[in-house]
Amino acid sequence: MIRFYNGRLLRFTGGMRLTDEELWTDGGAICYVGPTPAALPEFERSIDLGGDVVLPGFKNAHTHTAMTFLRSFADDMPLNDWLYQQVFPNEAKLTPEMVYIFTRLGIMEYLSSGITASFDMYVKNDAYAAANIDSGFRTVICSGLNNFDADPENIEREFLKFNQLNELVGYRLGIHAEYTTSMERMKYMAELAHKYKAPCYTHLSETESEVRGCVERCGLTPPQLLDSIGFFDYGGGGFHCVWMSDEDVALFAQKGLWAVTNPCSNLKLASGIAPVDRLLDAGVPMAIGTDGAASNNALDFFREMYLASVLQKVQSGDAAAGGADRVLEMACVGGARAIGLNDCDDLAVGKRADLVVIDLNRPNMRPLHNIARNIVYAGSKENVRLTMVNGRVLYERGEFFIGEDPERIYAEAERMAKAVRG
């Protein structure tokens, strides 16, 4: 067992609140949350928090982890040129070995940002899953069916395989986007959703031109089109959700669909600002994602939380919009529930031991007027003291414990990136 004591816990069940309880983990689960008992058992390790705060780890609810190979490679381009001229042609050069190394590099960045799980849509999923398992990191894979897939039926095989492969790996159904996927293939995905009573996800309403093109072709917005074929009959949601009509928002609220905002990527690609407050006020559940390093370029959840909040203020002209408490809950709780990790959404007995320790003994965290708001408005990666996934400390005070020498990962990533660039 591992003991965390002499600090604070940020808990969410029954409303966000700070407590001075201690927390114990046993294996991959939280086994005790409460006051310090009179008699203590023996612990494998006791961690004196020194006043620091523990919270459920951030969940990166939309990303393409192995896209680290395109970081700062295809910048300052509009989305369509970026996607079709740079991303797709270079992704075609990836080997499984490359995806493995680039994924491990991304996981290191997640851990140093307090992220304990990812929802990833990419390629060569066997190599991707192996990289997560070998690192001890938790992930849920989202299929990205599109017109370039040679074998659409492989989605079903992957769904069955990865959902029973390892406790750190899950799998959800999805298409890349309406504009890259034929109606035949979208209907196939909807049929799989009905067969397995499973949620479906996709890139959705990311740009104004995407929505306009869908309306011109089909007479419906992307959410309405997908709903018309039964794609969302068992839940799921969309990534980005920037250009959402009132009818789209009402559809998401009615069906309980998740909207995952990606503020850094949407700004860098000039896609727009997602209407986070309008979605939340309508009852749409929300989460936050980084998107990939090709369009961000950092996998940094502190930047995402800050922008998710302050962009609402600018968009609405109301400094009260984009409340920090809401944003922090989206990062910790919403992200877990959006991707089906309901046992990773809080600090409570029986939940998975996926957590982050935030160092409050840094200048940017003082004075302690409001710790939750400090994290959103003033926090940075320098405040991540420790990241634990499934009961294992994978990152602590600048060191990684992921079963591999970070220097080797850096060297291999550099070598492979050069090979892709030719």
Image (cartoon, rainbow, N blue to C red):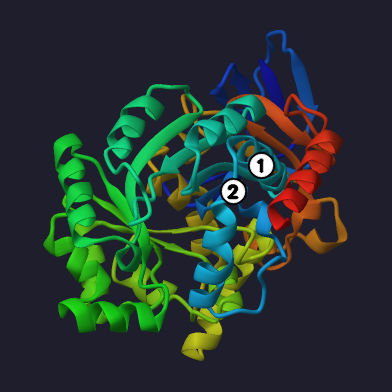
Q: Earlier in the sequence, mark 1 or mark 2?
A: 2
The residue that appears at 71% across and 43% down in the rendered structure is: 105
Instruction: Find residue 104 and report its horizontal and vertical position in percent.
Output: 68, 38
Structural crowding at the residue carrying mark 2, measured as other residues with C-alpha within 10 Å and reported as few (<14), some (14–19) or many (≥20)? many
Q: Position of residue 107 (x, y in %)?
A: 66, 41
The residue furthest bottom is 317
- Helix, strand, or loop for circle 1? helix
Query: Along the line of sight, which residue is nearer the eye, 74 or 6?
Result: 74
Residue, x 18% and y 68% (percent of image)?
225
- The amino acid beneath tag 2 is Thr
| Residue at image location 37% in from the left, 28% down from the top | 163
Residue 33 versus residue 292: which sits nearer the camera? 292
Residue matched to label 2: 65
Question: Which of these two is toward me, 225 or 182?
Answer: 182
Q: CB of mark 1 within 8 Å of CB of mark 2?
A: yes
Judge whether 411 appears above or below 163 on screen: below
